[in-house]
């Protein structure tokens, strides 16, 4: 994996935004895989600013997000769909019909996961996947476990994952659903290129395990070692020794 360390989270976010907008300029119909949570927020702020400065046209861009909460609909302010509308979609003009998202309120969640896999395939696969990493090494809602799901699936969330999402639910951890829907690791690894971002000292141990540890289901991010075109962007706080 290619590793670049930046002075701080804002410098990282600016560089990634420049890279993504450059990719859109080269391939206007690019298919992006996108994350949610706190870590990507500076990146989305930089994308909004740079899109305006460069007058980038997002009208042909297609997006697929990594995950969504079970039992939460797109109109719920705590949903990842609403998060993306606030952070990116509404500001840069992603066409509604080009937004791929899991429906946490689907009557048949297994069928919804299969629908999502088919939609990604029909779009030609994901060209550029942007990922965050949890302090426990999770990617999307792929939590550490004895085994990992290859495809999009229903997942039970660990307490730390729920706590990190409490801000979406008025700070109430009890209000965060205990299950989610998530792309599986094979779905993620099929992306033609992958960029993982990590900021903050609390991510250092997970990043070190991802880069140097064995490939293990106990640290899902370690599977990125298998990807032929993975890039890791870190701020200095998240940088392991000797990275």
Image: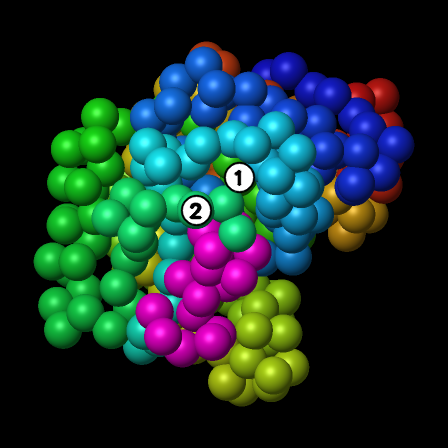
**Is 79 covered by the magenta stretch?**
yes
Position in image of residue 87 (x %, y %) = 56, 56
Q: Position of residue 5 (x, y in %)?
A: 79, 26
Camera-nearest residue between 242 and 125: 125
Whether residue 130 is visible to the viewer of this picture, yes or no, is yes
- Write the residue at 67% across / 42% down: 49
Query: x%, y% of residue 25?
Result: 48, 19
**What's the distance in space between the residues labelled 2 and 1, CA to CA?**
22 Å
Question: Which stretch is magenta?
Answer: 74-90
Drawn side of residue 218 relative to residue 151, left or right = right
Q: Is residue 82 above or below residue 23?
A: below
Q: Residues within 10 Å of mark 1 (few under 14, many from 20)?
A: many
On the image, which quarter does residue 98 sit in? top left
Q: Is residue 144 above or below residue 129?
A: below
> Which percent across, then down, holds residue 40?
62, 48
For residue 80, say whether it is visible: no
Q: Quadrant of the N terminus?
A: top right
Residue at (84, 21) in percent of width and height: 242
Nearest the viewer among 226 and 107 is: 107
Residue depicted at x 47% and y 55%: 90
Q: In the rendered view, does 10 fall on the left or right side of 105? A: right
The quadrant the C terminus occupies is: top right
Q: Residue at x 61, y 83 (%)?
A: 170
Q: Which label was assigned to residue 131?
A: 1
Q: Is residue 238 rendered to the left or right of residue 116?
A: right
The residue pinned by badge 2 equals 93
Numbered disc 1: secondary structure: strand
């Amino acid at each position: 994996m290619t590793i670049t360390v930046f002075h701080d989270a804002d410098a990282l976010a600016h560089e990634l935004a420049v890279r993504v907008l450059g990719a859109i300029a080269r391939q206007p119909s690019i298919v992006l895989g996108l994350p949610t949570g706190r870590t990507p927020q500076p990146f989305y702020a930089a994308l909004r600013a740079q899109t305006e400065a460069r007058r980038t046209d997002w009208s042909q861009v297609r997006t697929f997000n990594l995950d969504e909460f079970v039992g939460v609909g797109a109109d719920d302010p705590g949903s990842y769909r609403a998060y993306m509308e606030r952070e990116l979609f509404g500001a840069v003009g992603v066409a509604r019909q080009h937004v791929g998202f899991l429906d946490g309120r689907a009557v048949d969640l297994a069928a919804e996961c299969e629908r999502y896999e088919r939609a990604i395939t029909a779009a030609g696969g994901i060209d550029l996947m942007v990922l965050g990493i949890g302090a426990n090494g999770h990617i999307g809602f792929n939590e550490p476990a004895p085994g990992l799901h290859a495809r999009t699936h229903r997942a039970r969330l660990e307490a730390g994952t729920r706590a990190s999402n409490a801000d979406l639910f008025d700070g109430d951890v009890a209000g965060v659903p205990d299950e989610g829907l998530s792309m599986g690791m094979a779905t993620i690894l099929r992306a033609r290129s992958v960029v993982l971002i990590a900021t903050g000292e609390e991510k250092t141990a997970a990043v070190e395990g991802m880069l140097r540890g064995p490939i293990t289901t106990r640290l899902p991010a370690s599977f990125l070692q298998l990807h032929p075109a993975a890039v890791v962007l870190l701020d200095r706080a998240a940088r392991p020794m000797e990275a």
